[in-house]
Image (cartoon, rainbow, N blue to C red):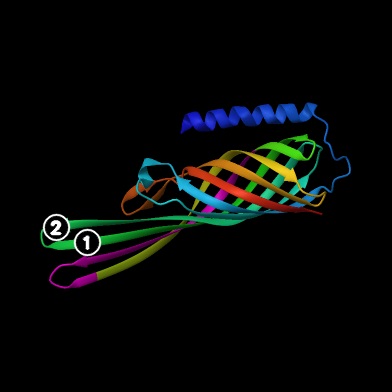
Amino acid sequence: MKRISKWVGVIIILCCALGLSFPAQAENKTPNYLVLKGGIYSPLTNDLDGFNTGFNGEIAFGHYFDKNWAIEAGAGYFGTSASKGAMFGPNSAQTSVHLNVVPLTVAFKGSIPVNRFEFYGIGGIGAYHLETDVDALATENSRVHVSDSDSEILFGGFLGLGAIFNVTPKLFVGLEGKYLWTTQSSFIDAETSLNGIQATFNIGFRF
């Protein structure tokens, strides 16, 4: 995973450097935008082995303070879950774990406009409110059902790449992929992070 983040970082630096030398195609484009992002979150850390690819959604506000540079603040939701069973002789146990995350992020973008397209690198930091829900059902001489939940704040960063197509001067669509890494969380007596891939289809509006 370190190799992935290393190469994504190199590409972002190149995009930012090239962005300084490519003039923006739309000199009079409005500097503010609102973008809705929807797609998937796929955990990559070994600690979340067996967890499903889940939904990832985000809403972000951005501002171009230069022809090729923007700052973006966002909030959203992503999650994943896993279900595992075990047998102990005649007895069985089934455990379900759900991870629900609400991120608050801020990021910088360095972009290269090419006609109606815009290619960019993005990198930022965030606070991630994680809620862990555990539901366990055991059958012995009788059925025993136990559930519990916990919440905490993790901190992390992300690097990514994206592309935008300007449908009109005010409307754009695009694709974005980010690699996320966070501090570790403790649940079910195990230490884990939320490291993974976030991939989204985006639709935005300039104003």
Judging by the rendered image, the residue that carries numbered circle 1 is: 93
Magenta extent: 122-144
Q: Which of these two is toward me, 36 or 17? A: 36
Disc sitting over residue 88 in the figure: 2
Q: Secondary structure at mark 2?
A: strand
- Three-letter code, disc 1: Ala
Q: Is residue 141 magenta?
A: yes
The residue carrying pointer 2 sits among few (fewer than 14), some (14 to 19) or many (20 or more) residues within 10 Å by Cα, namely few
Q: Quadrant of residue 8?
A: top right
User: Which quadrant of the rendered structure holds the C terminus?
Assistant: bottom right
Callout 1–callout 2 Cβ contact below 8 Å = yes
Is residue 88 rendered magenta in the image?
no
What secondary structure is the magenta-colored segment mainly?
A: strand
Note whether 113 is above or below 84 in the view shown. above
Q: Amino acid at mark 2?
A: Phe
Q: Residues within 10 Å of mark 1 (few under 14, many from 20)?
A: some
Q: x%, y% of residue 170?
A: 81, 52
Q: Is residue 147 left or right of residue 14?
A: left
The vertical placement of 172 against 151, above or below, is: above
Identity of the residue drawn at 25% across and 57% down: 85
- Return the x and y of residue 77 as percentages of the image width and height: 55, 57
Q: Residue furthest left?
A: 89
